[in-house]
Amino acid sequence: MKIEEVFQAYKDYIMPTYTKVPLIFVKGKGSRLWDIHNKLYLDFFPGWGVGNLGHCHPKVMQAVRDQISKLVFIPNNYYHLPQAKLAKEIVYWTYPAKVFFCNSGAEANEGAIKFSRKFGQGRYEIITFENSFHGRTLATVAATGQKKYQEGFAPLPEGFKTVKFNDIEAVKAAITDKTVAILLELIQGEGGVNVATKDFVSGLKKICDEKKLLLIVDEVQTGIGRTGKLFCHQHYGITPDIVTMAKALGGGLPIGVMLVKKEIADTLGPGMHASTFGGGPVICKAALAVLNAIQKEKLLSNAVKMGEYLFAKLNALKTKYPVIKEVRGLGLMVGVELAVEGKPVVEKCLQKYLLINCTHDKVLRLMPALNITKKEVDKAIKILDEALRGL
């Protein structure tokens, strides 16, 4: 297809549910992307956290090629080796638990909501937080603490109470005899890269233990090494009742996982929940390769090291440019809050072949791959420096 034909096909045949950037990418490797004109871009926001290994990591590609030649699909009423191996591997890296496989973060969170209601035996209310984001299904939109995602979709499912983030007293005031769970992101990505304090999280855990509530941690974006540990909750020294994960686990292929503490996992039995394509052979083989690469290539330690380096460089820019109000985040999940709109900065970076993101109008998001290099960080900072001039 010619370039004009591609754009026209999207206009004619694809629903306009995304704000499009007029770029057609045709190849990716690591943190590099090439467009249809063979222009090279540095990707510092690979797929909202999908690309923790960058694009087309060789271990993932080899795993997919190997599996796709043997077995692509088998329904979940049969057994297959990649799913068994992946479930065992995930539990090894977390805590005694069982998993449910699905296809996305929204599906994983939907499963956690459904699990909570079954567990509650009449208790059904879930406390969530302002500026949170948990997905685009009706239930996960209702759980999301941002009105802009809910507008036009009423009536939404009931049973969600949204309170102020990092405010333990607000949580206590919201609890009733119908409350069954608390659902939170430890770092609110779409909400502006807001980091939960350790006192707040320990307070939530204490409340959940005392009142027999489920603590559900949404690690869809923070999981799989993004913050310098395999899962963000490991920074806080807690064991959630449920952890949801997706995005980076598949290495670019769709996967979602609901991890549930072993002692309560059998709350859902045969026929109570399902996902046709969840945990298929190809995606499980890819996910195993992702976890293997993170371990073998020591990417957690690189995420810590490069995260510290990136934060130092960004804080130097903060000193240089008063328009930067705050640099926050953890590991390689970084938010740069500006005093002005961030869209022009994103556009200037794009013109200089750097891909970043802006959320909440004024928060630049940088989430480079865990195998990012010092040289690539320096290049990104140089471009961002140039984009910030004159603001």
Image (cartoon, helix red, strand yellow):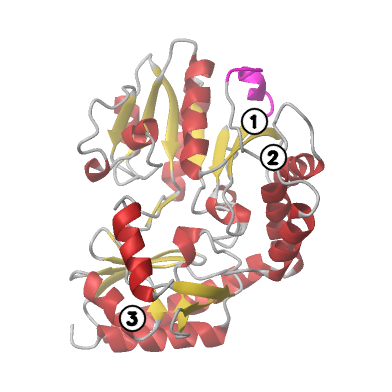
Q: Which residue is mark 1?
A: 261
Please identify the quarter of the rendering in which residue 241 is found.
top right
Q: Which residue is mark 3?
A: 349
Relative to residue 306, is residue 11 drawn left or right?
left
Spot occupied by residue 43 in the image (x, y as percentages of width and height) = 47, 74
Identify the residue shown where x is 62% and y is 54%. Answer: 250
- Up/down of 154 relative to 314, above or below: above
The mark nearer the N terminus, 2 or 3, is 2
Identify the residue shown where x is 24% and y is 33%. Answer: 153
Q: Disc 2 versus disc 3: distance between alpha carbons?
A: 41 Å
Identify the residue shown where x is 66% and y is 40%. Answer: 279
Q: Disc 1 versus disc 2: distance between alpha carbons?
A: 8 Å
Relative to residue 53, is residue 111 drawn left or right?
left
Q: Is residue 92 magenta?
A: no
- Give the secondary structure at mark 1: strand
The mark nearer the N terminus, 3 or 1, is 1
Q: Disc 3 versus disc 1: distance between alpha carbons?
A: 44 Å
- Asked if disc 1 and disc 2 are in contact, CB closer than 8 Å, the reply is yes
Which amino acid lies under the numbered mark 3 shown in the image of this protein? Cys
Observer-side mark, 3 or 1, equals: 3
